[in-house]
Each structure stands twice: as structure tokens, then as C-alpha cells.
Image (tube, rainbow, N blue to C red):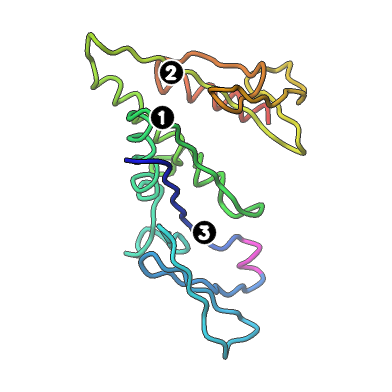
Amino acid sequence: MSGASVKVAVRVRPFSSREISRDAKCVIQMQGKTTCITNPKLTKDAPKNFTFDYSYWSHTSEEDSAFASQRQVYKDIGEEMLLHAFEGYNVCIFAYGQTGAGKSYTMMGRQEPGQQGIIPQLCEDLFARVTESRSPDLSYSVEVSYMEIYCERVRDLLNPKSRGHLRVREHPIMGPYVEDLSKLAVTSFADIADLMDCGNKAR
């Protein structure tokens, strides 16, 4: 692999109860990597087609053969991120969308089986891979930070005393970092799950 690689995925979620009560119409169609958008006010206009690395149809339910599950999204995106991390690259995922678009569900998911998001699945696989990679020449250290940036204030969600006054700095070699952000050592996915729970409660 050479240089940085950026991939873009879009996902359409099911209607919310509010949208159902308003008799909303779905204006999105997906086929393969292509997302097709129809303007409901200009039905005579040709639909607009956009091609991405992944177009995830999650608007229906598991019974639909085209339905993209949490597992499918992780297998496409999360597994590759973990692979690149073990190859020594920095990896990042950026979830973008308006409130209620499904960012938290895609990234964190829910506790029920099959509903976990990319982050918990990636963390589980991380420790599975560490366990498989037993070698006298290798040692692994895993640390977790959890922060919130809201209205340009950075808050450490794993430090109850944090009031949102942490500063973003730039290291000449390591790049941007958050000064005084907690870094907690973990040895299992259960440790990470506990910290995510604590961080979520602090939000």
C-alpha cells in the first residue's frame, strides 16, 4: 500500500416514526455502488446518480436481500481499517450527517446481538488478533481516549473533572494531539466496553 487512501460510503436508514407519521416518501435508490436521488418536486427531471466506494441500503429490513446490516458495514470498512492499523498506518473514520441521520448507530450501534456498530466490532477483532499474534518478538499496548468536541470546546469524557477547556496542539513529528487528554491502558474488549459506557454517560 502506498500513501493515504480515502474511501467514501453512504448509508440510507429506515424512516423514523416522525417520517412515517408524515407519510414521507423515500427519494433514494441504490444499486451496487451507485446512489440515485429523485427530486419529489420535479418528478419529470432525470434522477441524479452518484457513485461512491459503498452505497449501503439499510432502509428496509434483514428480509430484503439488498439490506446492508451492521456486520456488512463493518466487514467492508472496519476490517480494512484494522488491517491497515496492524500494518503501521494511522487510520481514521469520519461520520458526517445531520442529527438523526444514523451516525451513532453506524459507529456505536446498540447492545443487542447483531446491532453493534463499527467501533465495538473493531475493538473485539483487535483483541482477537492480538491473542492470535502470540510471538516472543512482539508486545502490544492498547490505550483508549474518549473525547467530545462541541461548540469548539474539547472535553475529556473519561475524566469527570474535564470542563471542556482542553487545547489542541501540534507535535512536530506526531502531528495534532489534545493536550492532557486521558489515555487509559486496556487489556480486553470488556475494558473498552466499560470505558465507552462511562464516556457515554458523561456526554
User: Real-space Cα distance between discs 1 and 2?
Assistant: 10 Å
**SS type, badge 1:** helix
Circle 2 residue: 142
Q: Residue at x 58, y 87 (%)?
A: 43
Secondary structure state at the residue bearing disc 2: strand
* Residue 32 covered by magenta stretch: no
Seen at 54% across and 23% down, the residue is 174
- Relative to residue 140, is residue 91 drawn left or right? right
Q: What percent of the width, then of the height, locates residue 128?
A: 30, 25
On the image, the x and y values in percent for residue 183 come to 56, 16
User: Residue most toward the top?
Assistant: 136
Residue 199 position by quadrant: top right
Comes first in the chain, label 3 or label 1: 3
Cβ–Cβ below 8 Å for labels 1 and 2? Answer: no
Q: Quadrant of the C terminus?
A: top right
Question: Magenta stretch containing residue 20, yes or no?
Answer: yes
Q: Which mark is residue 13?
A: 3
Q: How far apart are the alpha carbons under marks 2 and 3?
A: 33 Å
**What type of secondary structure mainly makes up the magenta span?**
helix
Q: Is residue 86 left or right of residue 12?
A: left
Neighbourhood count class around disc 3 (C-alpha, 10 Å): few under 14, some 14–19, many 20 upward = some
As drawn, 142 above or below 51: above
**Residue under pointer 1:** 123
The region drawn magenta spans 17-21
